[in-house]
Image (spheres, rainbow, N blue to C red):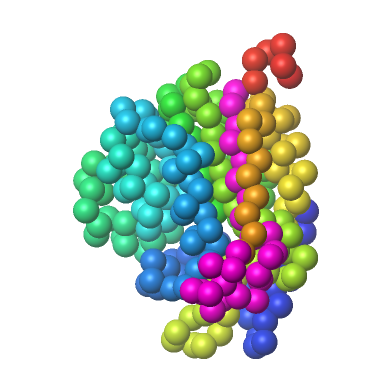
Amino acid sequence: MADFVFKSGADAEFVDTRHGYDRWAAIYDDEDNPLIAVEQARVDALLGDVRGLEIVDLGCGTGRHTLRLVQRGARLTAIDFADAMVARAAGKPGWRDVRFIRHDLQNPLPLPDASFDRVVSFLVLEHITHLPAFFAECRRICRPDGFLLATTLHPAMSLRGIAAHFNDPATGRDVCPAGHAHTTSDYVNSALAAGWRLEQLDEACVDAALAARSTRAAKYLGWPMFLALKLSPAAPDDR
């Protein structure tokens, strides 16, 4: 793995992940983000019916998925360490029904074994340094009949020098929270080594419809942008 080298027309500002997302919080929900547009439409289909399920959202951010899952009848635990992002989530309807834990996902999770029907993590994996440890913790807290759904920026984007970033209105500069150029095989092999079985690998490119409504998406027409892994706990004889 390697740190991202972000290509920008102006000098980009590289910051640690927490500081980057705290600065991003003010505009995160409102900006033209083609990756979120691609992801949003696919997550519900991959998760299926969540009514009555215990779900943990690892890296909940502004609660964009957390609160939708609450509305769909799930019981949510949400974890994040970016205070400004979570403050945005806390101002939205439904947050009182969420159990929130402030925690850095690079460290072992403060959660009991086998306590969740669904473990979800959206657009977080590129910021995880040690993928095997992260996937192992996800496996530990997932119930035997549950699954993990994790999404991320497609590794193909790093070939174009693209990482998670935003343009700071206060400075006009691109700001890049720290991330890593993991490959698809990094994700898959780390998950398999941690005791997961790959159920589905989902990829998506920017299509003409998205390019027509998103200025930022148009320059990536036809390029893989989104990657999701749906993983179930492997039985002992599968490992």
Furthest residue toward front: 208
Residue 70: quadrant of the picture: top left
211 in the magenta segment: yes
Position of 194 relative to 66 (above/below) = above
- Residue 151: x and y in percent read 57, 48
Per the rendered image, the range of residues in magenta is 207-233
Relative side of 137 to 101, left or right: right
Task: Quarter of the image for the C terminus: give it.
Answer: top right
Q: Is residue 171 visible?
A: yes
- Front one among 91 and 222: 222
Q: Position of residue 193 (x, y in %)?
A: 73, 30
| 83 versus 166 height, above or below | above
Q: Is residue 138 above or below residue 213?
A: above
Percent from the top left, x then y, of residue 223? 70, 64
Rendering quarter of residue 192: top right
**Location of residue 206 by image quarter:** bottom right
In this picture, residue 63 sits left or right of residue 12: left
State the image coordinates of residue 220 (x, y, percent, origin top left): 66, 71
- Residue 120 versus residue 2: which sits nearer the camera? 120
Q: Is residue 135 visible?
A: no
Count of all numbered marks drawn on residues in the image:
0
Q: Nearer the viewer, residue 236 or 23?
A: 236
Residue 108 in the figure: left or right of residue 86: right
Residue name at image x 50 percent, y 60 percent? 36
Asked if the stretch drawn in magenta spans residue 102, the answer is no
**Residue at position x 52%, y 54% from top?**
39
**What residue do we see at 70% from left, 43% from top?**
187
